[in-house]
Image (cartoon, rainbow, N blue to C red):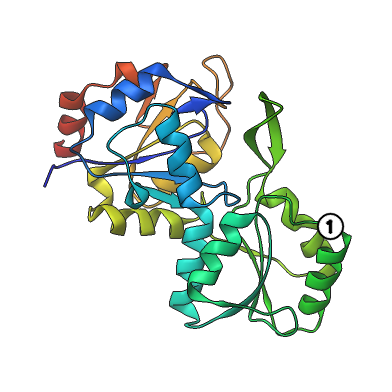
């Protein structure tokens, strides 16, 4: 088995809006024989929809087994701690599909209220979820704490509300602090390592957000690469109290496999 593995964010790394980043496509071709996973905090879309988008953008040698969304990570975690769990979910189809694989939907007395990205939040869903939490049995779970995520609307790039923004009304209304599963929580990275069958020191996380991609990976010993093609730009001030990445690059074309192997063996 190759000595390196990769965890790769998508928005701002593989594509911007509806356009592929050419250097990313070339890089993915270069690492096709290495174990890798795409990690995304966007819980609203199904793995198949993610794969279809990647293929349309020109990514080859990729399958469902190469994708881990925060919805998938959340469902897997809940099944591990509460086998056969019940849930009330607020979010897009990716969240509902992931939870249904392991659990059972229940809007009366579920084990968990789970909130993620997508168009599920409305007055009715907030009222239902808030009252479930106020009854004191269910726990509040968020797919991820990010305030925003990159997206498109009418084929134009836009900033969409992230998991942290969408769960806030439930937190305020119930007075309950949520447990977040996606980046930068270690749970998602640990699942990624198991999927790669690699130790933390053998894996590189490639991302564009210091406070999620880089921070979460560094906390458990995964090596980190910050790429300035997305959220974080070359001239931006690096956020305080956030671990510095092992490498900061302007393009994935700058990565050299020999250098990465040397870093692992250093």
Residue at 55% in and 81% down: 85
Quadrant containing the C terminus in the rendered view: top left
In the shown orientation, is residue 130 left or right of residue 234?
Answer: right
**Crowd around label 1: few <14 · some 14–19 · many ≥20 (10 Å):** few
Residue 250 x, y percent position in the rendering: 42, 16
Q: From the viewer's perspective, tell me whether residue 87 is left or right of residue 20.
A: right
- The answer to which quarter of the image holds residue 150 is top right
At 51% from the left and 49% from the top, the residue drawn is: 183
145 is higher (above) or lower (below) than 226: below
Check disc 1 and report the residue beneath it: 122
Q: Position of residue 155 (x, y in %)?
A: 66, 25
Compared with residue 220, is residue 110 higher up or lower down, i.e. above or below? below
| Residue shown at the point (63%, 51%) measured from the top left | 145
Query: Residue 30: x, y in percent?
Result: 22, 26
Image position of 263 with respect to 42: above or below: above
Observer-nearest of 103 and 163: 103
**Residue 177 pos. (x, y %):** 70, 66
């Amino acid at each position: 088995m190759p000595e390196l593995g990769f965890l790769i964010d998508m928005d701002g790394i593989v594509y911007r809006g509806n356009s592929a980043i050419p250097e990313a496509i070339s890089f993915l071709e270069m690492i096709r024989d290495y174990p890798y996973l795409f990690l995304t905090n966007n819980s609203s879309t199904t793995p198949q929809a993610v794969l279809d988008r990647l293929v349309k953008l020109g990514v080859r040698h990729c399958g469902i087994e190469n994708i881990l969304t925060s919805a998938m990570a959340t469902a897997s975690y809940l099944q591990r701690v509460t086998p056969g769990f019940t849930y009330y979910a607020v979010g897009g189809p990716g969240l509902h599909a992931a939870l249904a694989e392991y659990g059972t939907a229940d809007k009366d007395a579920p084990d968990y209220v789970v909130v993620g990205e997508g168009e599920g939040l409305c007055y009715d869903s907030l009222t239902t979820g808030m009252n479930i939490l106020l009854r004191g049995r269910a726990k509040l779970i968020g797919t991820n704490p990010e305030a925003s995520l990159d997206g498109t609307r009418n084929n134009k790039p836009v900033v969409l509300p992230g998991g942290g923004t969408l769960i806030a009304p439930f937190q305020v209304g119930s007075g309950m602090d949520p447990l977040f599963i996606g980046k930068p929580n270690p749970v998602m990275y640990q699942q990624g390592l198991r999927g790669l069958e690699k130790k933390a020191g053998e894996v590189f996380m490639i991302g564009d957000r210091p406070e999620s991609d880089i921070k979460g990976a560094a906390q458990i010993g995964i090596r980190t690469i910050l790429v300035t093609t997305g959220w974080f730009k070359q001239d931006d001030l690096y956020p305080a109290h956030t671990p510095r990445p092992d490498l900061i690059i302007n393009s994935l074309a700058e990565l050299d496999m020999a250098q990465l192997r040397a870093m692992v063996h250093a």
